[in-house]
Image (cartoon, grey):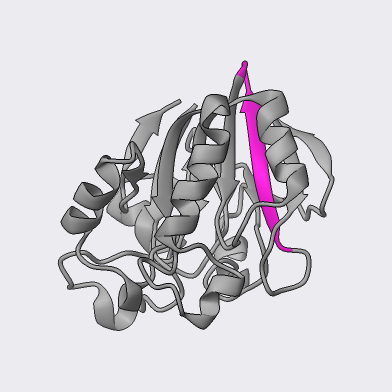
């Protein structure tokens, strides 16, 4: 599977005023094989243009939750060839070539979701906007084995921020990785808050010692 990070920032990144910044991040969104979109947020159309992706190739849309930085009705309507799949916790659905498994996330909104997405023997875990993983998620990761795990890292190094109750800081990311390392091949973090992180280069260097990679807008990898 080809994975493109269309956005890697939390809600405090505002495209209208921040786009010129060196380490600018759009609101978080992921594109798989140019056809499966996770989170049709308000910055997706800008990202598709920036990274030379064709909107008409997007066939399927799934959504982690309804917060404004992850879901835009305008974006959904603009992707005219795509079908939106409303999922609920514990759903297992076949969408095109993919099997998508939805898990209830630890996040402060109605039915927030994390996903395991499988295709041709490969598996991706997408766990943004959540704090500690639930027991069901951990069991699923152990059961299926994961080629790529993307974890929330909103809170940076802060240990006192109120967002910890529904987001990870970097210490939590390290603990999750240590607990599940035998079952996951590659780890990335995403959903970095503008106000709680240093530069991308410094974050990359900080996490490299733990074998955790840092996503950035436009990053494309093969799974």
User: Of 62 and 23, which appears nearest the observer?
Assistant: 23
Quadrant of the rendered image containing residue 213: top left
- Dominant secondary-structure state across the stretch colored magenta: strand
User: Of 51 and 113, which appears nearest the observer?
Assistant: 113
Residue range highlighted in magenta: 112-121
Q: Is residue 55 visible?
A: no
Q: Is residue 102 left or right of residue 129?
A: right
Residue 26, image x and y in percent?
37, 65
Q: At 44% from the left edge and 48% from the top edge, which residue is drawn?
A: 174
The quarter in which the C terminus is drawn is: top left
Give the number of callouts: 0
Q: At 53% from the left edge and 82% from the top edge, which residue is drawn?
A: 162
Residue 103 located within the stretch drawn in magenta: no
Q: Is the residue 51 above or below the residue 168 in the image?
A: above
Q: Is residue 199 left or right of residue 221?
A: left
- List the single residue furthest toward the top: 121
Q: Is residue 75 visible?
A: yes
Q: At 64% from the left edge and 35% from the top edge, which residue is drawn?
A: 117
Residue 150, image x and y in percent?
49, 45
Quadrant of the rendered image containing residue 18: bottom left
Q: At 44% from the left edge and 73% from the top edge, which residue is drawn?
A: 159
Q: Is the residue 124 above or below the residue 182 in the image?
A: below
């Amino acid at each position: 599977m080809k994975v493109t990070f269309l956005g890697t920032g939390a809600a405090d990144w505002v495209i209208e005023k921040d786009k010129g910044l060196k380490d600018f991040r759009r609101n978080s969104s992921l594109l798989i094989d140019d056809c499966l979109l996770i989170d049709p947020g308000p910055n997706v159309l800008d990202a598709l243009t920036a990274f030379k992706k064709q909107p008409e190739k997007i066939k399927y849309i799934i959504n982690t939750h309804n917060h404004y930085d992850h879901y835009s009705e305008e974006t959904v309507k603009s992707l005219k060839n795509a079908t939106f799949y409303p999922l609920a916790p514990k759903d297992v659905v076949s969408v095109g070539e993919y099997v998508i498994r939805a898990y209830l996330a630890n996040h402060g909104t109605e039915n927030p979701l994390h996903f395991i997405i499988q295709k041709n023997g490969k598996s991706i875990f997408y766990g943004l906007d959540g704090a500690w993983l639930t027991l069901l998620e951990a069991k699923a990761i152990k059961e299926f084995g994961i080629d790529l795990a993307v974890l929330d890292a909103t809170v940076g190094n802060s240990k006192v921020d109120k967002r910890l109750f529904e987001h990870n800081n970097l210490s939590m990311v390290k603990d999750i990785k240590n607990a599940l390392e035998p079952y996951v091949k590659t780890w990335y973090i995403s959903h970095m808050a503008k106000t709680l992180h240093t530069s991308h280069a410094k974050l990359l260097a900080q996490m490299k010692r733990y074998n955790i990679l840092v996503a950035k807008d436009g990053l494309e990898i093969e799974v």
